Amino acid sequence: MKIQTKAVHAGDRKKTGAYVPATTPIYSAASYFYDSMEQLDRVFAREEPGYCYARYDNPTNAALEELVAALEGGHGALACGSGMAAIHMALLAALADGRKAILAANALYGATVGLLMNVMEPSGVEVRFADVCDLDEFRQALEESKPGVVLLETISNPLLRVAPLDRLASLARECGAAVIVDNTFATPLLVRPMELGANLVVHSATKYLAGHGDVLGGLVVSDSGHYAGLRTLSRAIGPVLGPFESYLTMRGIKTMPLRMERQCANACRVASWLAANPAIERVYFPADPAHPDAAEILRLLPPGLYGAIVSFELKGAARDEVFRFMNALQMIVRSTSLGDVHSMMLYPVMSSHRDISPRHRERMGIRDNLVRLSVGIEAVEDIIEDLEQALSFQPRP
Ligand SMILES: Cc1ncc(COP(=O)(O)O)c(C=O)c1O
């Protein structure tokens, strides 16, 4: 063979033989080669296991999907290029029965509200919001809007409300609506929404699942009823995660329970410290006995595992004081994400909930003095010390 041909073919398409890599490698191949056309035909027809084309599936993604479906107790999963792509795919799969109405929690991640208002509604889907911590309001909204889908978050972003997922799911099912739960904040270590009646669970894998701030990804976990439809939609739309990100996510998940336990314990300590600090007006944290959903938290979250996000309001602070406080942080990273090994802080009004109208934000209870801290795995004393020095920081005149 000539060098041009060797450059293209040498070393490739080796049979894997009798050995099995101990962890799943990155399969970056876009397509797959078989001994015969007959065999490829059987793989296309799903009469024989195998892979044809990376938009359909890929061994690295398949391993991650199997892992996350096992953690959440689902029938199968789909790895997507972002959490938002995962939410969009879940909505499309759940609306496939033709009922063009969504009933959503009124406290949701800002971009999810954007997806509902700017993508779903203009495409002819009726969108309605309800306070899902109020069962009567939810019941009434269900009866009036007869939705095909109910969309919830396990622990809401950023005010950390915990709705009675099991009761909401059973009411939704009575009226024939599919239930989608965004389990990003809780992770399956704390709550497995499918055990509580959800049909589809979504994750921004960017957060606790991958956990190191180096992946943008999402997952949809599905029950058996929606799985085939989800995969058909995915083949048509092509929102799939790249194999490198899939590999990193799988690698991250191996330590997710360990990281999460540590982060939850650190968050409990940080929340108690903040609650006792006179510069803080209010702390939002699920371990607070005065939390408005304390009864649900006791019922749904395992003791000691209340999540690792602490939101709090700085007393009397306007945007400038919030900026001054956040600029003074030395170790806690000012950045727009959550769930990484390092602690990080975000200003919801400026980032996660920026595109929501001030009126809607007000209704959601997100005030201009609210910040959201994602507590990392560092020594908790160092996290508290950084908060303390930033709270007492006075700029030089
Ligand atoms: C609860 C929640 N769901 C979904 C998303 C969207 O995920 P991604 O940024 O991976 O698209 C986020 C992102 O912050 C989130 O916090």
Image (cartoon, rainbow, N blue to C red):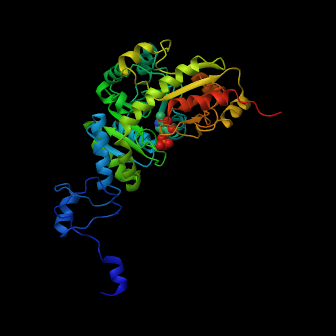
Left or right: residue 324 compared with residue 59? right
Left or right: residue 137 compared with residue 227? right
**Which quadrant: the C terminus?**
top right
Left or right: residue 33 compared with residue 357? left
Q: Nearer the viewer, residue 361 or 394?
A: 394
Residue at the far right in the pictured view: 397
Quadrant assignment, res 201: top left
Q: Nearer the viewer, residue 378 or 365?
A: 378
Q: Nearer the viewer, residue 5 or 22?
A: 22
Task: Name the residue at 23% across, 59% down.
Answer: 44
Return the x and y of residue 3 as percentages of the image width and height.
Answer: 36, 85
Task: Name the residue at 28% across, 52% down.
Answer: 23
**Which quadrant: the N terminus?**
bottom left
Instruction: Give above or below for 139 relative to 206.
Output: above
Residue at the far bottom in the pictured view: 2
The answer, for residue 120, to whether it is visible in the render is: no
Q: Nearer the viewer, residue 66 or 32?
A: 66
In this figure, what is the number of numbered marks? 0
Return the x and y of residue 179 as percentages of the image width and height.
Answer: 36, 29
Task: Name the residue at 36% across, 35% down.
Answer: 257
Return the x and y of residue 294 as percentages of the image width and height.
Answer: 44, 14
Quadrant assignment, res 99: top left
Instruction: Give above or below for 326 relative to 283.
Output: below
Task: Name the residue at 62% across, 23% down.
Answer: 313
The answer, for residue 326, to whether it is visible in the render is: yes
